[in-house]
Amino acid sequence: MTAVGSAGPAEKLTESPGEARCPYLVVREPDTVREVLHRAADFSPANALEAVTPLEGPALRVLQRVGFALPPVLASNDTGTHAGIRKVVAGFFTPATVAGMEPRIRELAREAAHNAADQLDGSGHADLVQAVAAFPPAVVMLELLGLPVRDIPALKRWGLDSMELFWGWPGKDRQLELARSAADFYVWLRKLVAESLAAPGRNLFKSLAEHGLSGPEMCSLGYFLLIAGQETTTQLISTALFRLLEGSAPVGWDDAATEAGSRSVVRHVLITESSVPTWRRVAALETDLGGMPVGAGTEILLELSGNQVTAPGQGRSWPPGQAAGSAEKAAYGLVFGSGIHRCLGAKLAELEAAVIVQEASAALPGIRLRDHQPEWIRLLSFQAPRTVTVDRPPL
């Protein structure tokens, strides 16, 4: 793996000694990352959703039996159809729509925070990932898209499994297990698409069908949107809660109970260790980047924010002489991507995270972190603590 925009030499990343883990050209310098994202004709998103670990025969057969297919539609679409499809999906994430969801987000956040308080009162401890962060983003996403709110625990499980299947390094047995989960998700999703087309009112899949998308195309778009649209927000919230309670956030737990405090900690986490720290591109042709030749077909890994997989402990590399304030501004400008594939749910995710952190801090005064070294999700493009276990100090 070669790094562009890094002060260090070329490096190879391994999962264990001698085992290749991340054979990408890694781009770290913010301006160069932005350049790649804006040169869509040169650097294609076609590999954005490909499995990091190639799927083996047994896993492929499980998927094939259910007709699993993920044609490029949105995030990995480098054709002329992308703009029209993106416009349809963007219609569900307008600024007015997102702002109008805030009361509902706050209602769900308060309910979740009070449930966590009840768990603390009953058992003396609670996991804030499950009690606070997990379910509100999924409910909000389904409601926003005009889809029925159901099977939320299964959707959360499917989302994490699919993230590991496509962005992780599962062994053969684990890959087969994850493929079965992905197949179950796909069958569920195909039924949801069919049901949505016959449902009254406006919803995502009816709008996509009216635009001319086929069933497999709608399933492909829905597959990743229903994961990214809520699981990455859960992970952002989880990291924000953990860093607050650990004491490394720019504000304290009590300060996060204010709107300004919660927004501050969420912005800090986005800049320093976003739930989506990297994203991929592939050189569509022979070109150059920062004066360095890049061959056609070169796989590129873009560092967006606080990547702990390919550069643990390094944080972001700022250009020499760049002021801290402008560096932070540059970092925030990349956390949701940039250019024609920028995340459509950026404002929604930040709003949800800030509201949920605020309500949790307000409803759970005096709690403390019980496990300072939880297991983390560490996938190529996703990261967060799996648990944020808390208790109350004895009186």
Image: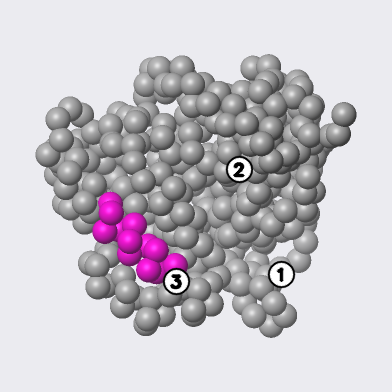
Q: Amino acid at mark 2?
A: Val
Image quarter in which the N terminus is found:
bottom right
Q: Amino acid at mark 3?
A: Glu
Task: List x then y, in percent, for residue 333.
Answer: 58, 34
User: Which residue corresponds to mark 2?
Assistant: 129
* Label placed on residue 113: none
Majority secondary structure of magenta residues: helix
Task: List x then y, in percent, for residue 9.
Answer: 76, 66
User: Which residue corresponds to mark 3?
Assistant: 177
Q: Amino acid at mark 1?
A: Glu
- The answer to which of 133 and 340 lies nearer the viewer is 133
Does 282 sit above or below residue 171? above
Determine the residue positioned at 49% across, 79% down.
173
Crowdedness near tag 3: few (<14), some (14–19) or many (≥20) residues, C-alpha within 10 Å: some
- The answer to which of 314 and 154 lies nearer the viewer is 154
Instruction: Name the colouring of the figure.
Output: one colour
The residue positioned farthest toward the front in the image shown: 122
Q: In the rendered structure, which segment of residues is drawn in magenta?
A: 178-189
Horizontal side, residue 8 vs residue 130: left or right: right
Residue 68 is at least partly visible in this image: yes
The residues tagged by marks 1 and 3 sit, at their Cα atoms, a distance apart of 32 Å
User: Which residue corresponds to mark 1?
Assistant: 11
**Cβ–Cβ below 8 Å for labels 3 and 2?**
no
Crowdedness near tag 2: few (<14), some (14–19) or many (≥20) residues, C-alpha within 10 Å: many
Q: Callout 3: helix, strand or loop?
A: helix
The answer to which quarter of the image holds residue 332 is: top right
